Amino acid sequence: MASSDSVYDGPPGISNLKRICYSYGMPDDITITVAKHAHLSQVETWAGRDDPAKTLLKTPKAPAPATPSDQHWAALRGNEVVAIASVELTKERVGYVNCIVKPGHQRQGIGSRMIEYVLSQPSVNDLTHLHATVDQSNIAAQKILNQYGFSRVGYSPDGRIEFARHKH
């Protein structure tokens, strides 16, 4: 794995994300798509909702969209779902970002790639307020959120760290 101060020496003419993938060994065989019911069903077989070691961010209680404006995406390696992300929207158009990476696929940059993809979606990027909740022990998720402009704003009643990103 390359160090963070290494110079990119991969093939010329590829995107910044691909440069990051090349430089840090992040898998380049991941496809992100709108999540379908079959994807969500697959996630239920491995999503440990109460095990903070298995989540990047806390997952919603129900994986199916609660309202038509909620959005879900799946990261696929072939036909296997290796991560799922969602944005739940309130009536006030405040978004709550959730992401979970399948055990055995963590620490490969997939969670970071998912968050980057979700935040690049026009329907999410246009939101003035985004929030996420992270377990205190999940340092990787905290760093990812900081990297994408989220700030620590407090603690949830169950002791998780709350992050927010506000646009003016």
Image (cartoon, helix red, strand yellow):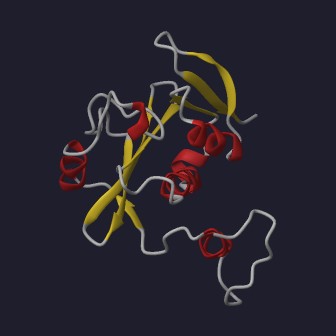
Residue 7 falls in image quadrant: bottom right
Give the camera-side residue of 38 and 102: 102
Tell how many labels: 0
Outermost residue, top side: 157
Q: Is residue 159 above or below residue 43?
A: above
- In percent of width and height, residue 6 lies at 79, 71
The picture places residue 158, in percent across and down from the top left corner, at: 46, 13
Q: Where does the image place residue 16, in percent across and percent down from the top left?
A: 68, 72
Q: Is residue 49 above or below residue 40?
A: above
The answer to whether residue 11 is left or right of residue 67 is right
Q: Is 113 drawn above or below residue 135 in the view shown?
A: below
Residue at image position (58%, 23%) is 161
Quarter holding the N terminus? bottom right
Give left or right: position of 57 versus 144.
Answer: left
Q: Is residue 62 left or right of residue 168?
A: left
User: Which of the 4 image quadrants contains residue 131?
Assistant: top right
Q: Nearer the viewer, residue 52 or 88?
A: 52
Q: Quadrant of residue 58?
A: top left
Q: Residue at x 52, y 24 (%)?
A: 92
Q: Residue at x 54, y 35 (%)?
A: 138
In the rendering, at what x and y percent does residue 32 appear? 41, 63
Name the one closer to the observer, 87 or 152: 152
**Residue visible at 36% across and 55% down?**
104
Quadrant where the C terminus lies?
Answer: top right
